[in-house]
Image (cartoon, grey):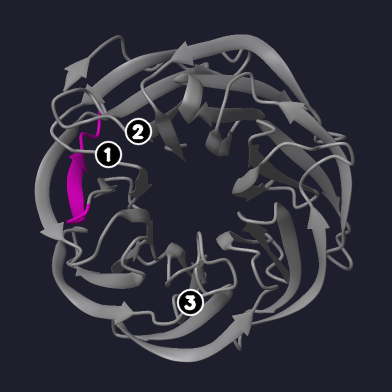
Amino acid sequence: MTNEQAQTAEEVLFYTGTYSTAKKPSIFLIAANKATGQMRVMNQMDGIDQPSFVALHPSGEKLYAVSEKAEGELFTYQVDASTKQLHLLDRKSTEGADPCYVSVDAAGRYVFVANYSSGSVNVFSLDDSGLPLEMSAKIQHVGEGFRKDRQEGPHAHSILPSADGNFVYVCDLGLDQLIVYRNEDGKLSTHYELKLPAGSGPRHLVIHPSEKFAYVVNELNSTVTAMTYNKNRGEFQITHHIPTRGENAQDENTGADIRVSPCGRFLYASNRGDDTISLFHINEETGELTAIEQVSTGGKTPRNFNLLAGGLLIAANQGTNNLVSFRIDRDTGKLSKTGFELELQSPVCIEPLN
């Protein structure tokens, strides 16, 4: 892993997972200037195929990456305290195909993986340092959805633990379901299954900072599903659906990523096809969404994006091999391009360090 100039006080850091190959750099540490949005590569790591999603341990000392291959793997890296360079510690089979999402519980006890093509999910127990010990659970989803071209079987697309770690939430694109599991010492048992509209293709879930509401971006019908959320019971109730696209959108499009601002007033969702990020205002009393605008991401196929400290949004345009930075207006949540972008091979996931 190469190392360049150290982080400055004006910069925030994030890791980027990509669809690059093991023979080339595929995980990057990027520094972004909070004032200008200018970005630069600080470190880069090779040796892993298609690390499409990465997640930091709560301590910041370990980085987990899934290798999205037919025989999926989970890689664990030590994060150097001073340089943030990555050092490979461990790699384990996910016993599933094409893992596309990885997350860690807030207590740092478990890592969770979603395997897209095989439609299965995993839990790995962690030791006190954050190193995976064993696979403590593997759940295979079964069934099919409405669309035979994309929902011929289960497709687990994301897996997210609740804040207290008692529940685990899985969006299955193939089944049109949000599946809620109980987490008991790393073992999963089905709590209940929430059915979403036929052919919607739920992809990613985000919990509102108040923990009163939750939102799912649906890939196949380009909508966001808004829900109330009972954190103690680990249950959701759908309130409404809202399109992620403008009224005049005509070409094919798929929804991708979803984020809520730390202040809880703004929700963002990305569109692949329109190649935009949609902004919604959130009613903080009811959780209701109001569509405000769609902004071009400055590239094609914005598979993921994320919000950084200092008021920046970084969009990862997989199709045009570039990261683009935006300034977020504090009062309105609207996005404006900083004028800076960074060339990067097939960027996918943005994971902030601070």
Q: Where's the N terminus, which quadrant?
A: top left
Residue under label 3, please give it: 144
Q: Is residue 78 above or below residue 144?
A: above
Tell whether 140 sits left or right of 335. Answer: left
Distance from disc 2 to disc 1, alpha carbons, whole Å, reads 6 Å
Secondary structure beneath dot 2 equals: strand
Q: Amino acid at mark 2?
A: Thr
Distance from disc 3 to disc 2, alpha carbons, whole Å, reads 29 Å
Which label sits in the foreground, 1 or 3? 3
Q: Amino acid at mark 1?
A: Gln
Residue 86 percent location from the top left of the image: 20, 34
Q: Residue furthest front?
A: 148
Question: Can the viewer see residue 11?
Answer: no
Mark found first going from the N terminus, 1 or 3: 1
The dot on residue 102 is none
Residue 137 percent location from the top left of the image: 25, 80
> Which quadrant would residue 141 be assigned to in this image?
bottom left
Residue 234 percent location from the top left of the image: 58, 83
Secondary structure beneath dot 3 equals: loop
Mark found first going from the N terminus, 2 or 1: 2
> From which residue to which does the magenta span run?
70-82
Distance from disc 1 to disc 3, alpha carbons, whole Å, reads 27 Å
Question: Can the viewer see residue 190?
Answer: yes
Residue under label 1, please give it: 50
Tell whether 159 sits left or right of 80. Answer: right
Residue under label 2, please give it: 18
Question: Is residue 75 on the magenta stretch?
Answer: yes
Mark found first going from the N terminus, 3 or 2: 2
Tell whether 54 sits left or right of 177. Answer: left
Q: Amino acid at mark 3?
A: Glu
Contact (CB < 8 A) between labels 2 and 1? Answer: yes
